[in-house]
Image: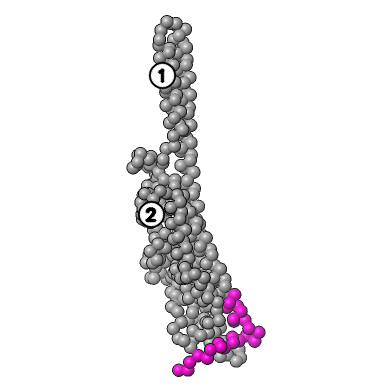
Amino acid sequence: MMGPGGTEIDARPIDERDFHCARAIMDGSSPYEMPLAGPERDPALAVYLDPLPYNARRAALAAGLEPLLARILAARAATSDRPSVDLLAMENELTLRVVAFHSQLLAAAFEAGCTADMIQKVLPDFTHKEQTRQLTITVASLVVGAVGSIVAGAWAIEDMSSRGPAVIGVGAGVGTAVLGIAALTHEERSIQFAHSRNRLVPLVSGIDPDHLYPPFVFQMLTLPDASDGKTPRDELLEAWQRDLERNLPATEQSAARDRLLGDGGSYDETLLTLRADMFEALESKIQGLARDLELLNRSLVQTLSTPDGRTPRPSVVPPSH
């Protein structure tokens, strides 16, 4: 089957969903969805969060842990003896939530890496089919040359005065040359590649209404970092744009971008490689988010594990009500 520009399209369509890399969608109505609280609004409680490093505080905000953590720190600061049952229950909830967020990061990184790997497994089909085509043409070229030589030789033995052998020889030579040129010519191939549940789209738009990502992971990707105010999402978009400009001429970039961010379409080897690279970059960025969650963990251990088992009061005295 021929596509636009004379490219050959593999009739066998491929759907990204068939890779079985992505998780089931958990929208707001799912019993397994973890609702996330907003930031701590009470200044008297928020002051207990001030000692946390910025990136640890960023992780707590993305995870919706600020209200819970602030109340734990305030309760521990006010406790003079053994922790209360309520305080222990809050600390247990905090532990369970942090463990769950670690799992969400691992799952999201797996989905991105799995998708990249599965796309890369499609790529050898292009090389194999092209090599098969070139081998077939090469064999045909040899057959044409050999048959032409045999026929011309036999004719010449039969009739030395005839021009037939020369004509056959010239024809065989022309056929061999044409087939040889065809064998050396690279033929563009493409496949129909579908991705209606496109996990690149939320990162480009900055919103995830279909819950393609766990909310904690998406908030970590879209909250600014401390160093330059950029978000991990900003850095991803810049890397993706550089790859697009490096691999495609300017005249083809807009159409390629539309295809990558749409429901799919005709993909050649270059576009498939680009999509795989985009998911690899996403996997690396999600794995990097684990550093901030690990920093939050260490900060909690340091803050909650003072020698006397109590949390120091904040240096700023909270306003009285």
Image quarter (top left, top right, bottom left or bottom right) of the N terminus: top left
Question: Main SS type for the magenta part?
Answer: loop
Q: Is mark 2 on a helix, strand or loop?
A: helix
Is residue 110 depicted above or below 83 in this figure?
A: above
Is residue 126 depicted above or below 161 in this figure?
A: below
Is residue 68 depicted above or below 206 in this figure?
A: below
Q: Please name the residue that numbered disc 2 is placed on.
A: 257
Residue 11 falls in image quadrant: top left
User: Which color scheme does this rendered protein use?
Assistant: one colour
| Residue type at the position of mark 2 | Arg
Is residue 103 depicted above or below 308 in this figure?
A: above
| Residue type at the position of mark 1 | Gly
Percent coordinates x, y for residue 297 in the rendering: 57, 74
For the residue carrying disc 1, how many other residues have a C-alpha within 10 Å: few (<14), some (14-19), or many (20+)?
A: some
Percent coordinates x, y for residue 90 in the rendering: 52, 82
Outermost bottom residue: 321
Residue at x 60% of width, y 92% of height: 80
Q: Residue 293 carries which label?
A: none
Outermost right residue: 307
Residue at x 56% of width, y 88% of height: 315
Residue 320 belongs to magenta span: yes
Kindly tell me whether residue 100 is visible in this rendering: no
Q: Looking at the image, is mark 2 or mark 1 earlier in the sequence?
A: 1
Q: Are marks 2 and 1 in contact (CB under 8 Å)?
A: no
Q: Please name the residue that numbered disc 1 is placed on.
A: 171
Image quarter (top left, top right, bottom left or bottom right) of the C terminus: bottom left
Residue 284 belongs to magenta span: no
The magenta stretch spans which residues? 298-321
